[in-house]
Image (cartoon, helix red, strand yellow):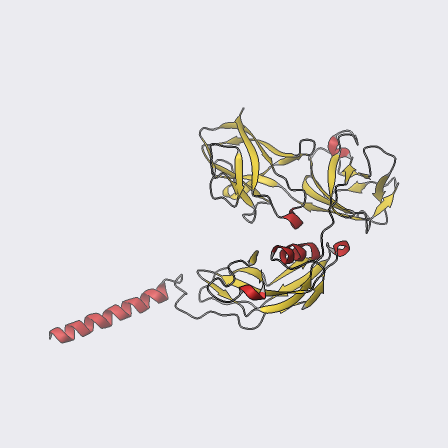
Amino acid sequence: MKKYINKLFLLGSLLFLAASCESEGVVTTLQSVSFPSAIEVSSTSIVLKEDTSDDAALLVSWPKVTFPIAAPVTYAVQFDLTTDIKGSEAWLHAKRIVVGEDVLSKSFTGAELNKIATDLGLKTDVSGELVIRVEAAMDHKVYSAPITINVTPYLKTVVMGEIYMPGSYQGEWDVETAATLNEIQLGVYQGYMTLAPDRDPIFKFNKARNWAQFYGAGNTNFDLKNMSDANFVLPGAGSYQIKVNLNTLKWSSTPYSWGIVGTSQAGGWDNSTPMSYDHQTKTWKITANLVTGALKFRLNNSWTINYGPADPSTNTINLDNGGAYDIPEAGVYEVTFKIDEVDPLSNGYPKTATCTIVKK
């Protein structure tokens, strides 16, 4: 009789475990998940040039990976050297770029691919091999079969020039105090500014802090024309990253804002409160009502780039650090954030930035 009871107990245990695996959808690691087909690249041989670094250089695309439960799949693209994808440290030194949830392709500009290639150690002006694979993640990660491409990086020119952006966002057009755009590569300039809701969105670009030579709009709002009386126009109120290419006589604006995030501000951990850029001090600022809770900083309302303090007793904040400042009491605070972000696309974001949090 005891024998039969033991068998029934064993059978019941197995049935319970099977039922648990079916009822708890998060346990997918017991089931096989894989890429249904190979990833694809737009080119397997790429010669990068600095004067076309803003152009798309590589498109990586992949098939949808289906996990056993209905939830978003987060994809990332990894680059590595052919010598680093085998053995106990395989892919440990790879460059990993998070693409997002349920996104099935990622485009890389020449500047982005050049930084990846040179960071991994490829020599400039020499063709070298990079291996690419795609990561799909839910409760666990699976990887595509790798694909190899040949890339010839360029040596970035060291430049130190500036141009200036006088406009109505200042209140009065004053080229002496206008926002500065730094030269990030030969003939290409980049800077940051904030347009308040009560200011007109018009401006020009000047070669010096005077009106001896300036650019206005040409055939379109995004064409530069020497000494044109027509003003450029921003899309509307907000903060922007401005880029000007004097080689192609084109300019662009991209929404760009650092913000405070955490339980001390209105959006909690889900939504940042955007800061405004003071172009004269090159500092991001906000005056806000805060409550007791945590506070740190992130870019463009996303966790892709964020800073937290390794030591909350200091004003130094660290890239991708999980720490946060503690706001001890509710009130109106002035918060500032300062970072060296002259060329994050090519140089990456710095390991540290600085901030101040002062109760008014």
Tell me what residue is drawn at x 66 percent, y 34 percent: 282
- Give above or below for 205 relative to 72: above
Image location of residue 109, percent across then percent down: 69, 57
Tell me if residue 334 can be seen: yes
Is 117 on the left-hand or right-hand side of 5? Answer: right
- Give above or below for 201 relative to 103: above
Tell me if residue 43 can be seen: no
Along the line of sight, which residue is nearer the eye, 255 or 336?
336
Along the line of sight, which residue is nearer the eye, 318 or 333?
318
Tell me what residue is drawn at x 23 percent, y 72 percent: 11
Along the line of sight, which residue is nearer the eye, 307 or 68?
307
Q: The N terminus is located in which quarter?
A: bottom left
Tell me what residue is drawn at x 49 percent, y 38 percent: 309
Q: Residue most toward the left?
A: 1
Along the line of sight, which residue is nearer the eye, 196 or 310?
310
- Give above or below for 51 relative to 351: below
Image location of residue 126, percent across then percent down: 70, 62
Residue 171 occupies quadrant: top right
Image location of residue 241, percent across then percent down: 69, 43
Residue 15 occupies quadrant: bottom left
Tell me what residue is drawn at x 58 percent, y 39 percent: 259
Q: The C terminus is located in which quarter?
A: top right
Image location of residue 261, percent across then percent down: 52, 40
